Amino acid sequence: MVLGLGAALLAALLYGVAAVAQAVAARRLPALEDGVGRVAGRAVRDPLLVGAVVADLVGALLHLVSIENAPLYVSQAGVAAALPITALTSAIWVRERLTARDWAAVAATFGGIAVLAVDAGSVGSTSRVTPLTVVLYVGLAVVLVTAAAAYRGQGRTAALVLSFLGGLGYSGTALGARLLGDAGGAVAWGVLAVLIAGCGITGYWLYSFAMQRISVAAASAPLILTETLVPTVVGIALLGDDVPAWWAVVLGLLLSLAGALYLGGFEGRLQHPPVEATT
């Protein structure tokens, strides 16, 4: 449990800092309508975006370690700490002081994680790897089709939909990683590895597209909410994650997510934008 929670918090630190760097880089990328090749070419030449990708990859590896050593409700709540870290990093970026309510939200997030960790149960397992893998592939296809429609939309709502879909993509990554522990044989591992990579790439780019249109924390809030709650519910209902005390899980999730979601509006309260596109 200690290893799982520690890996999740380290992943959250990397994710939170990388989110701000990713936002800066994403906002100076050309629009997708200018061509995928041009977008990809600019992306691989941007050291800030490359650094954010590296940080996210290391965070993803730590996240996998956490998923294998802690129930999903602990692992995903620990990673939700990325949003307070994103807000703190954004505040430092523009030298803006956090208010007492902001600090209370940070405390609530980490307090909720502590409650979950203290009363966490054992990591579950399942024999339904194949049908769940099929469901995840179908879910990924639905996310991609919906995202294509949302990308053509305009305004804040379309950006929030992209962020929500990105959260579903990351949820698929977490669930696919959990299924790896119960999969048997090289073929099953290969199929799940492709799924995990596909979900992770989908989540990353949808999150980037959302941050091209709205602030870092505003885009992070629905993503964090989705990638925390969806794996939590599936982990308990279908993957056998043990829940010794329901009150602790409910209280821990409420505290951590309430704090994270409050901080989702942090950047809207700043007098200046948290990150600025540069040329």
Image (cartoon, grey):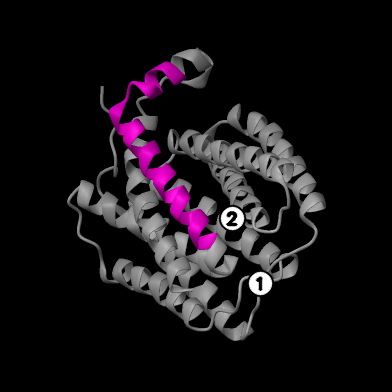
Image quadrant where one finds the C terminus: top left
Mark 1 touches mark 2? (CB < 8 Å): no
The residues colored magenta run: 40-67
Numbered disc in front, either 1 or 2: 1
Q: Secondary structure at mark 1?
A: loop
Looking at the rendered structure, the kind of residue marked 2 is Thr
> At 39% from the left edge and 63% from the top edge, which residue is drawn?
9
Locate residue 123: give its quadrant. bottom right
| Nearer to me, 226 or 101 | 226
Dominant SS of magenta comes to helix
Q: Is residue 80 above or below residue 121?
A: above
Marker disc for residue 93: none
Residue 66 counted in the magenta span:
yes
Locate residue 195: give its quadrant. top right
Q: Badge 1 is on which residue?
A: 241
Residue 236 image position (x, y, % from top left):
69, 70
